[in-house]
Image (tube, rainbow, N blue to C red):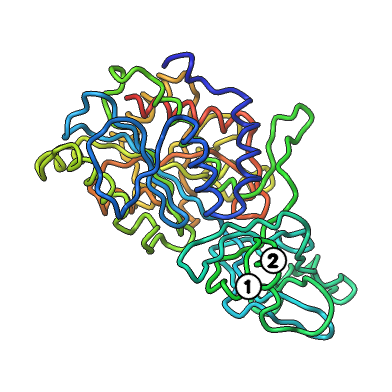
């Protein structure tokens, strides 16, 4: 791989900025688009006619983004090299009727999104971010990035068993944040959010809002070899994909035998079944339209898909020093050990032996070490967008990622070197 494509700790520094700028999937998409624009990519509208021009393009839909680079001379049947990821993270989401409270406390009514670790949201300073929908059909991003909300934990004096029998949280009763004092007023939160966004509250007809931890990411450890931060599952992979795609688009077109693609979807944490999720038609539609815009036929589309490979990049579990028995006894991924290949013979991950060879070749090309993750047979195995992508589009898919601790916590932990090791591997894969 060209030395110009090698990432270093500067990539990890930029990841920290990306995490801070992306408190919601909608912000993650906007941050990704901004970086791609600087690399020469241009947005194309789904409702517009597409042409066969070369260069970098991207499509935005809600909390999802798909971007691709068509090199000069690419035939209509040219296969794709795709890196897939997801923009959403387990968290709390504001309900349609958000204003609630009791006993002089004003609170916000929230739903639990995905498999979040509830206790990690307790006693944490929270902001509020997302998007609001306006009467004219447009959307406005909102990011109130200061301490605004808090989910207060019950004092140990009132729950003497919390440290012996374990903390027990009721998802409905115990997770509603406080944000002030006084009587509950219907419409109060949205009036406040509208004012922060600089719009008239009467023009706000919908919202997708979520609390987020305002504490910034930070290097951790004696030698700053660790990185702690929010939403690394899975913005770490989204950031790596954006950086890799931007970098390979700067390669001479003659060195790109494939069309490199990044696809970052929303709603992975609750099953991917939406118009912006990996189980929807968005990716297939974009790839097909690219083939047809270049004058291709259905036969060209079939040939392109048959030669396409996708790396599904999502975080995985590093071995936990306090719970080593929960991991497979012979597979112990460690942080700063390089990206992990995720394997499950029951197809919770899409990797097979052929995919392993593809990934190994990319890591060897990049000079990056890599590891293997397999679940303990007595523990259920998670899944991600890999099997969905493989089954829905008939595309060979390999599941990979970075090893982390505290997955689904409001604040997760990874090795400080792993983000750029992952990005290097992805860039090598995209260039074939």
Residue in front for this viewpoint, 89 or 108 = 108
Reply above or below: 115 against 53. below
> Dot 2 corresponds to which residue?
195
Q: Describe residue 131's horizontal placement relative to residue 153 as left or right.
A: left
Residue 311 visible in the picture: no
In the picture as drawn, the residue positioned furthest to the right comes out as 157
> Residue sitting at 37 percent across and 54 percent down?
278
Q: CA distance from mark 1 to mark 2?
A: 7 Å
Residue at the image point whose x is 54% and y is 48% from the top: 28
Q: Which residue is tagged 1?
A: 201
Where is the N terminus found, in terms of image quarters?
top left
The residue most toward the top is 3
Instruction: Please tell me whether mark 2 sits on a helix, a strand or a loop.
Output: helix
Query: Disc 1 vs disc 2: Cβ atoms closer than 8 Å?
Result: yes
432 lies above or below 402: above
- On the rendered structure, is 282 left or right of 423? left
Q: Observer-nearest residue: 230 or 260?
A: 260
């Amino acid at each position: 791989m060209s030395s110009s494509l090698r990432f270093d700790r500067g990539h990890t520094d930029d990841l920290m900025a990306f995490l801070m700028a992306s408190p919601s999937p909608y912000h993650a998409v906007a941050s990704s688009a901004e970086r791609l624009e600087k690399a020469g990519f241009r947005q194309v509208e789904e409702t517009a006619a597409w042409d066969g021009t070369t260069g970098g393009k991207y499509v935005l839909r809600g909390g999802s983004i798909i971007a691709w680079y068509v090199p000069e001379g690419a035939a209509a049947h040219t296969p794709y090299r795709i890196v897939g990821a997801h923009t959403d993270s387990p968290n709390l989401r504001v309900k349609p009727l958000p204003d609630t409270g009791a006993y002089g406390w004003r609170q916000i009514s929230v739903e639990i999104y995905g498999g979040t670790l509830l206790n990690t949201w307790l006693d944490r300073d929270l902001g509020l971010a997302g998007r609001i929908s306006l009467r004219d059909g447009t959307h406005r991003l909102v990011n109130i990035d200061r301490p605004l909300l808090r989910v207060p934990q019950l004092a140990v004096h009132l729950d003497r068993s919390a440290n012996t029998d374990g903390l027990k949280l009721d998802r409905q009763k115990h997770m509603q944040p406080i944000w002030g004092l006084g009587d509950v007023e219907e419409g109060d939160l949205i009036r406040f959010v509208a004012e922060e966004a600089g719009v008239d509250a009467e023009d706000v007809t919908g919202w997708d809002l979520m609390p987020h931890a305002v504490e910034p990411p930070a290097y951790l450890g004696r030698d700053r070899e660790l990185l702690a931060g929010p939403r690394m599952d899975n913005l770490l992979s989204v950031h790596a994909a954006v950086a890799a795609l931007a970098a390979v688009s700067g390669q001479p077109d003659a060195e790109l035998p494939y069309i490199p693609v990044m696809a970052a979807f929303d709603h992975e944490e609750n099953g991917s079944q939406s118009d912006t999720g990996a189980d929807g038609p968005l990716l297939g539609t974009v790839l097909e339209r690219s083939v047809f815009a270049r004058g291709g036929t259905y036969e060209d589309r079939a040939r392109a898909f048959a030669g396409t490979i996708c790396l599904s990049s999502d975080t995985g579990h590093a071995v936990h020093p306090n719970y080593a028995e929960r991991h497979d006894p012979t597979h112990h991924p460690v942080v700063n050990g390089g990206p992990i290949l995720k394997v499950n013979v029951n197809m919770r991950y899409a990797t097979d032996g052929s995919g392993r060879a593809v990934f190994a070749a990319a890591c060897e090309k990049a000079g990056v070490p890599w590891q293997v993750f397999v679940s303990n047979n007595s523990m259920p195995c998670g899944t991600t967008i890999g099997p969905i992508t493989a089954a829905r589009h008939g595309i060979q898919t390999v599941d990979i990622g970075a090893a982390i601790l505290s997955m689904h916590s409001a604040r997760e932990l990874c090795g400080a070197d792993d983000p750029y090791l992952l990005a290097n591997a992805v860039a090598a894969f995209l260039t074939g």
